[in-house]
Amino acid sequence: MAAELTAHDLIAKHRPTLDQALEAIRTRAYWSPHPEHPKAYGENGSLDMAAGKAAFDALLGSRLDLGQPGTDDWVGGEVSPYGVELGVSYPHADLDELLPAMKAGQRAWRDAGAETRALVCLEILKRISDRTHEFAHAVMHTSGQAFMMAFQAGGPHAQDRGLEAVAYAYVEQVRTPDTAEWTKPQGKRDPLALTKRFTPVPRGIAMVVGCNTFPTWNGYPGLFASLATGNAVLVKPHPRAVLPLALTVQVARQVLTESGFDPNLVTLAAERPGEGIAKTLATRPEIRIIDYTGSTTFGDWLETNARQAQVYTEKAGVNSVLVHSTDDYKGMLSNLAFSLSLYSGQMCTTPQNLLVPRDGIRTEEGPRSYDEVVADLARAVDGLLGDDARANALLGAIVNPDVKARLEAASGLGEVALASREVANPEFPEAVVRTPVIVKLDGAKPDDEAAYMSECFGPVSFAVAVDSAADAVELLSRTIREKGAMTVGAYTTDEEVEQAVQEVCLEEAAQLSLNLTGGVYVNQTAAFSDFHGSGGNPAANSALTDGAFVANRFRVVEVRREA
Amino acid sequence: MAAELTAHDLIAKHRPTLDQALEAIRTRAYWSPHPEHPKAYGENGSLDMAAGKAAFDALLGSRLDLGQPGTDDWVGGEVSPYGVELGVSYPHADLDELLPAMKAGQRAWRDAGAETRALVCLEILKRISDRTHEFAHAVMHTSGQAFMMAFQAGGPHAQDRGLEAVAYAYVEQVRTPDTAEWTKPQGKRDPLALTKRFTPVPRGIAMVVGCNTFPTWNGYPGLFASLATGNAVLVKPHPRAVLPLALTVQVARQVLTESGFDPNLVTLAAERPGEGIAKTLATRPEIRIIDYTGSTTFGDWLETNARQAQVYTEKAGVNSVLVHSTDDYKGMLSNLAFSLSLYSGQMCTTPQNLLVPRDGIRTEEGPRSYDEVVADLARAVDGLLGDDARANALLGAIVNPDVKARLEAASGLGEVALASREVANPEFPEAVVRTPVIVKLDGAKPDDEAAYMSECFGPVSFAVAVDSAADAVELLSRTIREKGAMTVGAYTTDEEVEQAVQEVCLEEAAQLSLNLTGGVYVNQTAAFSDFHGSGGNPAANSALTDGAFVANRFRVVEVRREA
């Protein structure tokens, strides 16, 4: 097949973007080439709001034929958390046919070199970006995110994370030059002289195990890091969130074909209900890299058993916010209320434990007791979510029955400071929409410890009464060390407490947001600037995205000969 | 304690060297700041030959008191492969005292930052370099290397590898800036603005498990990579090769003290015979990084069981040289003869399997049959080692009884093309010195396969008769894939065969030396230019030194707040 997208085209089109991304990861200043505003789309080939919705609607009830080899069945069955049956069916693969087929194109992909691979990845991301409106609906109706969040987090922010991974992968590969002339003086004798050629080579086939809540945002870093370093990539989506990743695979296969590469470098492994193919795939010798987001149980299993692979995991954690003192009490409350509410707390970065001294806190309005702080926070959440339309736009839908069950059980764990309420969604009456619950617990009570020292994923927060700032810092330290944390927040005007919290975060390797009272929230990170997790505590063994996330996805082979 | 070595001193003294190292790993051209010639030492504070020997002699029979906390006994008992009882005793540690003491200084070491850490490491290396003559004897009388090799490989080459690791560690840490101002436009509203601070933080305590044959060369990369990234380092030497690493620890502790840091950031864990403390230490929660060189059995055990740690291993492998055709037959034979003889083949990079077509090879002197090639190579080895003085200088001594036993057993594996002979060493009559054995095996005989598909560490090579170049390439591929390889060599004037060998090395991730006939040998690699292993086949899971070798020894913690 003739390549329609030449290397020359790709350089002209995408090299400036790659260079900007390389500069952004170096300065870590704000940058993104992917617009966040829905109205920014509709020109230069991108789908506008209506076209995106129409494209999504056309997918419903269809068979998404990716043209993959070894397709032996069609599977599907996603039901949107908003109640819609998607009815899309996907190819089910005979792995003994699919995996060998994925290896066929690896040599040409390897020989293309780091720059071409990066630019092909950027073309894939550009085409995904053009279809952001369509992807937004796909993310919304698999994750349960509200439309605007599905649009932003599932669209531009996910694309940013993919591009960031490509930039890191590219720069890591070109740290070693293609060739070197090595000449070693030998005194009066002739020097020793060698010509050396260095080639980045892939590990093999990489598997991305997608998650239910952020199929694109959590899936793109691993997918693009592996592909850009020369690996073929098998995408194994969460059975409830196949569509966004299936569309991603579709786009990748089109671009690979048009640029003259084998489309089987990127494939989808959809599965039958209960088939559990991630476990089967994880120990196959062809699978040399695994990216996983999900439960600690399966993440630990992968780390222990997939010994032939490099395994990158993001697992469960318990995120804490230490509430000690503030000079902007209202700002603190509204910032926290938003953090607890966004996507019904179904983010790996949502705070769970609010550590509040039982003697209360200092504010610019004077002291507030523990009970007052918790009541004021409950009021702030109530105020934020009082209007049903706004509540729906912030909360989205409960992603699955497990989350709902945990939410319902949470009110039995202690005194309920804020009860969860049902919110009606007139557009999608079947959606399960619930406001967060806040439960009071006592940090000194062994009975309460079981609750606050476990991840309770969903719209559940614990206001944990602690004896003092020092006690809070100690509990924070223990929580990160034993349970892991993707995020830590702290509110304090006291230099000593700030130092103590920082020291704990440095010691236990957790990312800290201090005194956020405005429009940035502890649960949000920005690509090119913020790391997502640290890779240094039990919540995750890698950070999105840094050198360590990409450097072991390839190896450098040297061929040397006398000059 | 007052710091005698200020940061200012260190920058003036070592920053230019660090900058040159950074440039060298980028261009991979020849560079080294450590002289290879013994006569280059003796000025500017470095020990000359006589002073180095005197310093070593003074160590014999002494107690090397490192001033470590938790010392509960004194252990030792090294006997040189040259017959000398070293009689040096070392501190034995109560780990429950030593490990906590190692953590005490970590915060100050972390807070010192990447540049200061790198420069302190360079000062350690400089002082080791000044004592190269003393270290040479220590390496010689533990590894059995001949003096000149112990001097070069144990001295400047090891120091180069340490410096290379420091350079990689430094540049990896400064990829992320210390601070960033992040300002995100919000249309007509005020932009969101955050100030972010990024700090590289160590994993914890790193353990270096030293090997018998190259205590410094194989120990320094991990030691310096971990120390430069902020970790404390516990050095667990091989019981037969304690002295070179104990001296290294001594120097490191002196430099740390003089530069105002806690000496307990670097400690020694010597052990009683049969104590096996590496296994105990490997699963202790404090140990977060392990560098290991040694048997596949224990390397695999570490990878499987030391789950709390990043584990970097170099294990066994089977190195092959494909002999297909040459336009410099004599050069090829003498190059191969040297490679097989150097340090009695006791290098992880020594070729073991010589794959020779049973129909013979083409040379510029006409065709040579399989038997002729093997006989000519045997003659070349004989010629190289015919003179006892030269043989002693090249071979060194057999490092331990296991190697001697394997050598003796090898002649029973097939037809002996070159028998091993005993070489007398007049200076050290007790040294076991043996020339290499070459055994003929048939690649098509299942009985022979067990021999050539296992590592036979020591002065043993197999001339494996293969059916054709294609058969050799296929066997090469299978050997790397199943057994691993630190090095691959090939001699061919045929473009197609060269391409096929290259493709196998790219596919299986092995480092290839092509048509070496001069003064560079397949078993030698140069720091700053050659990678040692690829980290992509079973012989090793990491390469000395690249980004992946350093990037996961630390994590970056971000603290962000509103600007």
Image: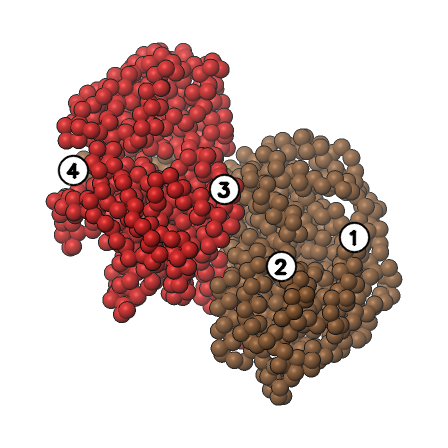
Chain colours: A red, B brown
Alpha carbons under labels 1 and 2: distance apart? 34 Å
Helix, strand or loop for disc 3: helix
If you read the primary sequence from the N terminus, does the residue marked by circle 4 or circle 2 appear first?
4
Labels 3 & 4 near each other (Cβ < 8 A): no
Q: Chain of mark 1?
A: B
Please say whether residue B436 is visible from this viewpoint: no
* Position of the N terminus of chain A by quadrant: bottom left
The residue at which mark 3 appears reads as A303
Q: Which mark is residue B188?
A: 4
If you read the primary sequence from the N terminus, does the residue marked by circle 1 or circle 4 appear first?
1
| Mark 2 Cα shell of 10 Å, populated few (<14), some (14-19), many (≥20) | many
Q: Which mark is residue B264?
A: none
The residue at which mark 2 appears reads as B317
What residue is shown at x 35% (from left), y 23% (from top)?
A406
Q: Nearer the viewer, mark 3 or mark 4?
A: 3
Q: Is residue B431 left or right of residue A46?
A: right
Mark 4 residue type: Lys
Alpha carbons under labels 3 and 2: distance apart? 25 Å
Q: Residue A321, relative to residue B224: is it above or below?
A: above
Helix, strand or loop for disc 1: helix
Helix, strand or loop for disc 4: loop
